[in-house]
Image: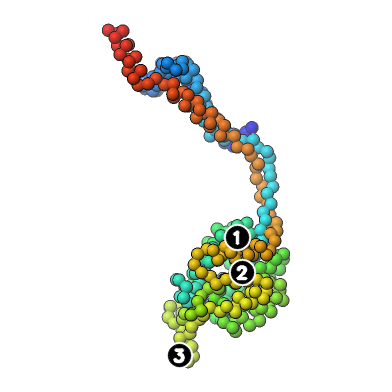
């Protein structure tokens, strides 16, 4: 047996032993420090337990509490625990259409919320993070640190938005480079789907590189105006307002690559189901290992003993009525 906090034990046990010794053997010196009322409580006569035995019970209870706080354990040595999970790449659309407000407060912010919900559903997995519009670039390498990934997602704001046309083929090429050495090549895209011209050649690029696509589509079929950096609706060459709509064609491409798609809604259930589907289809692989100490905690036993002894010791204290009667008898004897 050993203590997790041995320093706590030695810091507390020395003054405890000194105090117990002074209380039980030298009344005069202790009285200089503690009031007479405290000492009377510690030394009070009892009809249940003798004074010395009750003091021993109470001091033993305090000692057991010190032992419990020092956290005694039986250390069975170091244990290696393998970490299992899948590896996948996520990509966030930052094209100009993501500024549209058919999702509150806009498509980009709504997509960020869904991406963070998706990350919460992937404990133990290795996730990489990208952003894309005209070009694709890495926001975070593959990591199991979900909290850090969510902070990075929070940092993506409208300043990132690129008004140039979305290039999905460029996304496929960059994803292939990042997933080149991975057993499974999984790409999860958070986007409004882009326009038909942007998707041209995307399916062939994914199949050529062996990438399975999952799409989280953000937006509505009704659509909303495309906004510029000042929040004003943009117009086409003919003077009409440019409207961007949810494009489910990307979902069909996802299914043709062996993946699937979901139209993002409120709540977390859609992201949880998507994560479960990916886990069902792709087997987990070893993502590393952690070294832990295999310990059997023993603090509960001295703690239980301390509580039991405290109950015995405190229940043996004289009642206030008994103390009052003894005080009156002493007063009569004195008179």
Q: How many marks?
A: 3
Q: Evaluate whether residue 320 shows in this view.
A: yes
Look at the numbered disc 1 and give the secondary structure of its residue. Answer: loop
Residue underneath mark 2? 188
Nearer-N-terminus badge (3/2): 2
Between 111 and 137, the residue placed more toward the observer is 111
Q: CA distance from mark 3 to mark 1?
A: 46 Å
Residue 235 at x, y percent in the picture: 46, 86
Residue underneath mark 3? 239
Disc number placed over residue 44 in the picture, else none? none
Say whether marks 1 and 2 touch (CB < 8 Å).
no
Residue 268 at x, y percent in the picture: 52, 63
Identify the residue at horizontal 60%, vertical 37% (top origin).
297
Q: Which residue is situated farthest in the left direction here?
A: 335
Look at the numbered disc 2 and give the secondary structure of its residue. Answer: strand
Residue underneath mark 1? 122
Residue 316 at x, y percent in the picture: 44, 21
Q: CA distance from mark 3 to mark 2?
A: 36 Å
Between 143 and 310, the residue placed more toward the observer is 310
């Amino acid at each position: 047996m050993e203590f997790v906090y041995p320093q706590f034990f030695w810091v507390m046990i020395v003054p405890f032993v000194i105090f117990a010794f002074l209380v039980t053997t030298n009344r005069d010196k202790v009285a200089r420090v503690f009031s007479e009322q405290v000492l009377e409580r510690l030394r009070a006569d009892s009809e249940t337990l003798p004074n010395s035995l009750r003091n021993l019970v109470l001091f033993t209870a305090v000692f057991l509490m010190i032992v419990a706080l020092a956290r005694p354990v039986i250390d069975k040595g170091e244990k290696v625990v393998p970490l299992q999970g899948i590896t996948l790449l996520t990509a966030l659309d930052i094209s100009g259409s993501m500024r549209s407000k058919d999702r509150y407060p806009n498509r980009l912010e709504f997509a960020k919320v869904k991406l963070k919900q998706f990350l919460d559903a992937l404990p133990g997995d290795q996730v990489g993070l990208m952003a894309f519009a005209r070009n694709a670039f890495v926001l975070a390498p593959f990591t199991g640190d979900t909290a850090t990934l969510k902070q990075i997602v929070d940092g993506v704001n409208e300043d990132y938005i690129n008004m140039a046309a979305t290039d999905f083929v460029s996304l496929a090429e960059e994803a292939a480079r990042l997933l080149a050495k991975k057993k499974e090549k999984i790409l999860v895209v958070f986007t409004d789907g882009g326009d038909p011209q942007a998707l041209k050649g995307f399916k062939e690029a994914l199949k050529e590189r062996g990438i399975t696509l999952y799409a989280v589509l953000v937006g509505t079929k009704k659509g909303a105006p495309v906004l510029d950096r000042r929040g004003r609706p943009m117009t086409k060459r003919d003077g009409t307002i440019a409207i961007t709509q949810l494009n489910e064609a990307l979902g069909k491409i996802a299914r043709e690559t062996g993946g699937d798609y979901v139209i993002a809604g409120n709540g977390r259930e859609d992201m949880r189901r998507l994560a479960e589907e990916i886990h069902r289809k792709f087997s987990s692989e070893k993502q590393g290992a952690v070294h832990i100490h295999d310990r059997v905690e023993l603090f509960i036993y001295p703690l239980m003993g301390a509580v039991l002894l405290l109950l015995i010791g405190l229940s043996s204290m004289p009642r206030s009525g008994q103390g009052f009667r003894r005080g009156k008898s002493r007063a009569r004897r004195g008179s």
